[in-house]
Amino acid sequence: MDGRKISDLVRSIGIKQRMMADTHLRELGINAVQGRVIGYIADHQDHGVIQRELATAVQRRSASITSVLQGLEKRGLIERRVPADNGRNKQLYLTAAGQALVLQYDSLAAKINGQTVAGLTDAEMTAAVKLLTRINQNLPEI
């Protein structure tokens, strides 16, 4: 066996999960890029995020991120705060509405993850994680 079947299956699983996630994101009124932006801000809520860092993290140009942020801010999902020690770099934080949206999405993501591994035993999941980890380690970091 040449590994193509494994690559095809991994790709197929990823596509199916992404399609399911996109459906749930649409139900929440956001798209995939907005979801990644909100997710990144949520993960760094303790110290805030500057726009340049966010653009790098979600692999988008600063101009596109500006547009995404303006839309999220207009919808009341994020806010910009000026830190006392640096008036130039506004930091991004989720609002209460943004945090509520993240909780909703996390619940939906848990359902997707549960559906992905439905019917597998703990031993099968452990074996799958070991194999996929080894495969992942064969590839360069991105």
Image (tube, helix red, strand yellow):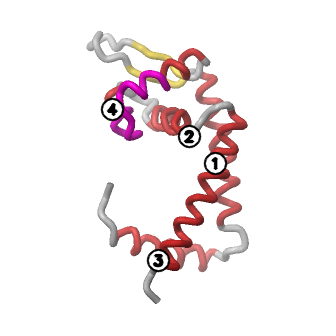
The label shown at residue 32 is 2
The label shown at residue 100 is none
Using residue 46 as the reference point, say whether residue 138 is left or right of it: left
Q: Residues within 10 Å of mark 3 (few under 14, many from 20)?
A: few
For the residues bearing labels 1 and 2, Cβ distance under 8 angstroms: yes
Residue 112, compared with residue 102, is above or below; it is: below
Q: Residues within 10 Å of mark 1 (few under 14, many from 20)?
A: some
Bounds of the magenta span? Answer: 53-68
Look at label 4 and name its amino acid: Glu
Real-space CA distance between mark 2 and mark 4, rounded to the nearest whole angstrom: 18 Å
Magenta stretch: residue 63 in it? Answer: yes
| SS for callout 3 | helix
Whichever of callouts 4 and 1 sits on the residue coming sooner in the sequence is 1
Badge 3 is on which residue? Answer: 131
Real-space CA distance between mark 1 and mark 2, rounded to the nearest whole angstrom: 8 Å
Real-space CA distance between mark 4 and mark 3, rounded to the nearest whole angstrom: 33 Å
Residue 33 in the image: state x and y as whole percent. 51, 37
Whichever of callouts 4 and 3 sits on the residue coming sooner in the sequence is 4
Whichever of callouts 1 and 2 sits on the residue coming sooner in the sequence is 1
For the residue pair 79 and 22, the one nearer the viewer reads as: 22
Q: Residue at x 33, y 37 (%)?
A: 56
The nearer-to-camera label among 3 and 1 is: 1
The nearer-to-camera label among 3 and 2 is: 2
Q: Residue at x 63, y 45 (%)?
A: 22
